[in-house]
């Protein structure tokens, strides 16, 4: 085994290591390296014949001693899938800080007289992604329109009951690239590839529920989670009386928000839900805002607009009257949703937001420089990773297992170690690991970031042995042609071995 430098197991950012790390208490003294028998069992998993044409990378390291327990291609570059979010999240947490918030600002472009804004309402933001509601975990509102109802209430408090002009979305904080430049075009209509911008609603997509009719003579019921004229839904579902059924949403054209619901359903079928992405985030935001203002008693005579429609627009915020601002939940809460749900839009937004905070211009290039600087600060050299998007959807990203372990080590031992530990998905409990490793020693033990794109999987994080030794690990596989279940068999099987291991 290769030796590694010994790191102090006692502190994180000057506090006891055990502080805030629920369920983990470091072994004292640290256990010895694993026996050859355990290493042979780990080898057997990674040499599964189903992966004969694939390429595995792995590193397992003791946190207490720094000793390498196991490694395989640990310094090779791998496409990391959503393990890429570790880089984005670590950079955002260290650069922005856990208490940082997104801000949405509202301006009057005109005078307010007797409850009437005699001009336009201008809305600016630096990327707040939390204007989304739902019943699932890590959501910020019960209903997607709730934050927009809050905006209407604030306008009424400011004395505005009528807007004579338009509602203009000022998206100047970011450049006009609403997708990552390395995106696969065919995947753009799907929710994981949702467009992102400074003004966002419903995480850039729409949830559509299709409910079966009561009788073969009735129609299906199609219910979007947010009703808006920005989106057109076409019902082409056929109702049948028997046989197998299926509901699918045809891929929308890349340049319009027309969604065709097609397929067949019969009475008694379970509901089916699909979530296509929606183009033009600024107009999506302003359209929903205008619709909600009208519903909430703030009448808009004009229409939703994108500031880019005004070729001669030269006004700055100093030329307008600021009405109020609305802040997002703290970054610490947003990162929990990002990491546990593996939310792509949050990650892509944060890259541009960091770029905006650093340079005043939110572009991928300006944000990437911040990420690269933050990675250097935690010990990653430029030859251990390639950063081409914030979420891991790009196949141009590369990172080594050793770099992944270094990120997890540095973050756990850093200023925000408690929060970093807290945002990790937990095996068998929550997030993207909620259904994995249940009823095994790894359940409620493994904390790790998942990753999945075509022919690529990743899992990097922490596992505690049966005698209390914390291990850091990173498992990455590229070019596999088997199933998700098969990759889980390998990675989860190794983690179950480690969770059950005791040196005593």
Image: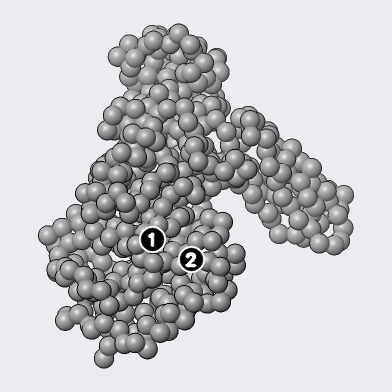
Residue 296 lies, in percent from the top left, at 51, 28
Q: Quadrant of residue 349?
A: top left
Query: How far apart, in angstroms, are the residues tagged by discs 1 and 2?
Result: 10 Å
Give the camera-side residue of 313 and 303. 313
- Secondary structure under the numbered disc 2 in the rendered image: strand
For the N terminus, the quadrant is: bottom left
Q: Is residue 334 above or below residue 163?
A: below
At horizontal 41% and vertical 66% (from top left) the residue drawn is 57
Q: Is residue 448 visible?
A: no
Q: Earlier in the sequence, mark 1 or mark 2?
A: 2
Q: Tags 1 and 2 in contact by the CB under 8 Å rule?
A: yes
At horizontal 69% and vertical 55% (from top left) the residue drawn is 271
Q: Quadrant of residue 60?
A: bottom left
Q: Is residue 34 above or below residue 379?
A: below
Near mark 1 (Cα within 10 A), the count class, few <14, some 14-19 or many ≥20, is some
Q: Which mark is residue 414?
A: none
- Secondary structure under the numbered disc 1 in the rendered image: loop
Near mark 2 (Cα within 10 A), the count class, few <14, some 14-19 or many ≥20, is some
Q: What residue is disc 1 on?
A: 76
For the C terminus, the quadrant is: bottom left
Q: Is residue 177 visible?
A: yes
Q: Which mark is residue 55?
A: 2
Give the camera-side residue of 209 and 448. 448
Give the camera-side residue of 466 and 206. 466
Q: Quadrant of residue 63?
A: bottom left
Residue 332 lies, in percent from the top left, at 31, 49
Q: Is residue 281 above or below residue 71?
A: above
At horizontal 19% and vertical 54% (from top left) the residue drawn is 415
């Amino acid at each position: 085994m290769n030796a590694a430098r010994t790191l102090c197991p006692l502190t994180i950012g000057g506090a006891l290591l055990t502080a805030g790390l629920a369920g983990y208490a470091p072994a004292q003294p640290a256990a010895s390296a694993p026996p050859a028998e355990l290493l042979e069992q780990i080898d057997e998993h990674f040499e599964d014949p189903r992966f004969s044409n694939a390429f595995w990378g792995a590193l397992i390291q003791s946190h207490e001693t720094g000793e390498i327990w196991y490694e395989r291609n640990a310094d090779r570059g791998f496409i990391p899938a959503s393990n890429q979010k570790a880089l984005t999240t670590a950079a955002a947490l260290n650069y922005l800080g856990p208490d940082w918030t997104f801000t949405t600002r509202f301006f009057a472009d005109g005078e307010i007289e007797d409850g009437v804004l005699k001009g336009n309402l201008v809305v600016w933001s630096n990327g707040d992604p939390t204007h989304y509601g739902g019943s699932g975990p890590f959501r910020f509102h019960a209903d997607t329109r709730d934050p927009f109802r809050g905006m209407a209430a604030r306008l009424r408090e400011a004395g505005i009951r009528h807007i004579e002009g338009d509602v203009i979305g000022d998206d100047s904080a970011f450049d006009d690239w609403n997708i990552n430049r390395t995106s696969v075009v065919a995947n753009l209509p799907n929710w994981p590839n949702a467009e992102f911008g400074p003004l966002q609603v419903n995480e850039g997509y729409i949830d559509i529920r299709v409910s079966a009719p009561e009788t073969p003579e009735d129609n299906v019921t199609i219910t979007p989670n947010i009703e808006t004229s920005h989106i057109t839904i076409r019902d082409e579902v056929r109702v049948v009386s028997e046989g197998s059924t299926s509901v699918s949403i045809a891929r929308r054209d890349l340049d319009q928000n027309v969604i065709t619901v097609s397929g067949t359903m019969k009475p008694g079928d379970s509901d089916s839900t699909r979530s296509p992405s929606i183009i033009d985030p600024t107009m999506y935001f302003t359209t929903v805002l205008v619709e909600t203002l009208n519903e909430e008693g703030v009448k808009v005579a004009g229409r939703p607009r994108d500031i880019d429609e005004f070729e001669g627009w030269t006004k700055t915020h100093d030329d307008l009257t600021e009405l109020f601002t609305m802040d997002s939940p703290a970054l610490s809460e947003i990162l929990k949703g990002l990491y546990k749900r593996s939310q792509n839009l949050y990650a892509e937004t944060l890259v541009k937001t960091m770029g905006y905070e650093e340079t005043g211009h939110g572009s991928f290039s300006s944000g990437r420089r911040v990420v690269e600087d933050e990675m250097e600060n935690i010990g990653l050299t430029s030859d251990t990773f390639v950063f081409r998007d914030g979420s891991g959807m790009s196949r141009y990203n590369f990172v080594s297992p050793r770099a992944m372990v270094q990120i997890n080590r540095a973050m756990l031992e850093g200023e925000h170690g408690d929060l970093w530990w807290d945002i990790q998905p937990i095996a068998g409990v929550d997030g993207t690991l909620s259904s994995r490793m249940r009823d095994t020693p790894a359940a409620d033990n493994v904390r790790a970031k998942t990753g999945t794109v075509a022919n690529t999987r990743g899992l990097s994080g922490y596992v505690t042995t049966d005698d209390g030794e914390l291990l850091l690990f990173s498992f990455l596989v590229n070019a596999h042609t088997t199933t998700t279940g098969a990759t889980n068999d390998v990675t989860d099987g190794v983690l179950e071995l480690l969770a059950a291991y005791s040196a005593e």
